[in-house]
Amino acid sequence: MGLTEIRTAIKVDLKRPADQQSLLHNRWHPDVPFAAKVKDGEIVKIECVDWTGGQIGNNDSADDMKNIDLTKIHYLSGPFEVENAEPGDVLLVEIQDVQPFQEQPWGFTGVFDKNNGGGFLDEIYPEAAKAIWDFEGIFCSSRHLPHIRFPGLIHPGIMGCAPSPEILAEWNRREAELISTTKLERIVAQPPQPKNVHAGSASDEIKEKVGKEGARTIPGRPEHGGNCDIKNLSRGSKTFLPVHVPGAKFSVGDLHFSQGDGEISFCGAIEMAGVITLKLSVMKNGMKDLDMKSPLFLPGPVEPHYGPSRYLTFEGFSVDEKGVQHYLDATVAYRQATLRCIEYLRRYGYSDYQVYLMLSCAPIQGHVGGLVDIPNACMTLGLPMDIFDFDISPIGGTPKKLDMGSCAVVSK
């Protein structure tokens, strides 16, 4: 018995603006029309543009990163009508393969300008920067980050099913409350934004409604998953997604060649356009059977392997760079671990921005050390030493500064 050829359920055009392609969308809303249909248990290939819709170029300037229009992201392929899927079911998504397009064997990692997107360390590193990565089979390297090479763990940053009208209203309610009550001097959430809304093949009336009500794709949310950026959801992984609308309205996008835990620079993975191969199956009444309130995941068996003793590990606590004590703040602690690593790698000639970019996309491991020893949470960042072609271990001898060139920066 011969193998059945896997069909491509959605095709994209890399030469055409993403907002002119009817099989893509960039808001979560139950009224975004179906882009394609998939049978229960069918395996399909799905083409995806990069998350910016092609706004970032393969060049040596970060001007495009500085001036990116964040009202356009993320462009997702879908939504798919999955046969037999009804509210209360669970959609099982099995990732069988993810690959870049053969005609576009490169990706990018970026740092956004503090005033246009920002990032994990934008108070310290406020300017935009970028690195371009070339793909060599399973490996990648960058002219902007010399002496570094590692295998990718290719995965989608975003998978999710459309919210019901009730769930969408709840998202908008609680995020609006956060925006109105925050005391932080920064943007803490993005409300619905009609500007540059793309609702696939929707009529003008539906598109206007999606623009007024549709949830931004920037955060993941507990009811459906979305933009979770979990790097181990690669080949062989299984994701169990709650279904809230008839047909599921499943969408996928934001493909990554590689990512470090935390994707700390925001545009921090190696972002790429490509093709993902999925098997979509319906588990009837799965939400009740699994007592499901949020998605479940079974990571795949494939990942870069470095021995436990090959990770140079940095520690961070809930005391920020200004010496202010915080109470069990894991975000502050992970930020401090990141800064310790940046400081350490300066000795070899890398700029801070080069290390910031690298830590966002290389296969670093972020772990929780402790969350109970008041007042300090403890977080660790494990940097695989074998991604470098020279010895960075503390017992490797006197550090020698190398010519590390520069990442792409903004023109003055």
Image (spheres, rainbow, N blue to C red):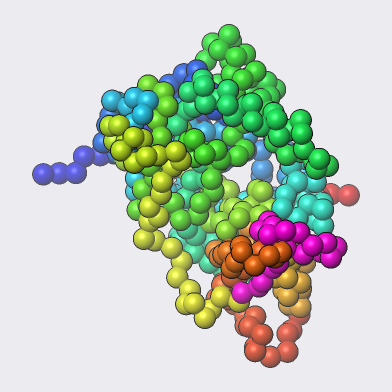
Q: Is residue 12 left or right of residue 409?
A: left
Relative height, residue 382 to residue 221 (above, below):
below
Task: From the top left corner, tell me how far across and down residue 325 is, in percent.
Answer: 79, 62
> Quadrant location of residue 289?
top left
Q: Residue at x 64, y 67 (%)?
A: 373
Note whether 152 is above or below 126 in the view shown: below
Q: Nearer the viewer, residue 60 or 352?
A: 352
Q: Residue 183's x, y, as percent?
A: 81, 40
Left or right: 234 with respect to 322? left
Residue at 68 percent across and 53 percent down: it is 265
Instruction: Give the magenta-colored segment's residue range.
Output: 313-332
Q: Taking 118 as reference, is 42 left or right? A: left
Number of numbered discs overlaid on the protein picture: 0
Looking at the image, is 270 positioned above or below residue 33?
below
Q: Main secondary structure of the magenta part?
A: loop
Whether residue 202 appears in magenta in the rendering, the answer is no
Query: Residue 197, located in which quarter of the rendered image?
Result: top right
Coordinates of residue 312 in the picture (x, y in percent): 60, 76
In this view, 300 is above or below 341: above
The residue at 65%/18% (across/down) is 212
If the image is split into quadrants, where does the N terminus sit?
top left
Q: Residue at x 56, y 72 (%)?
A: 384
| Residue 42 seen from this side | no
- Percent coordinates x, y for residue 172 in the rendering: 63, 26
Closer to the camera in the image, 129 or 321: 321
Identity of the residue furthest to the left in this view? 1
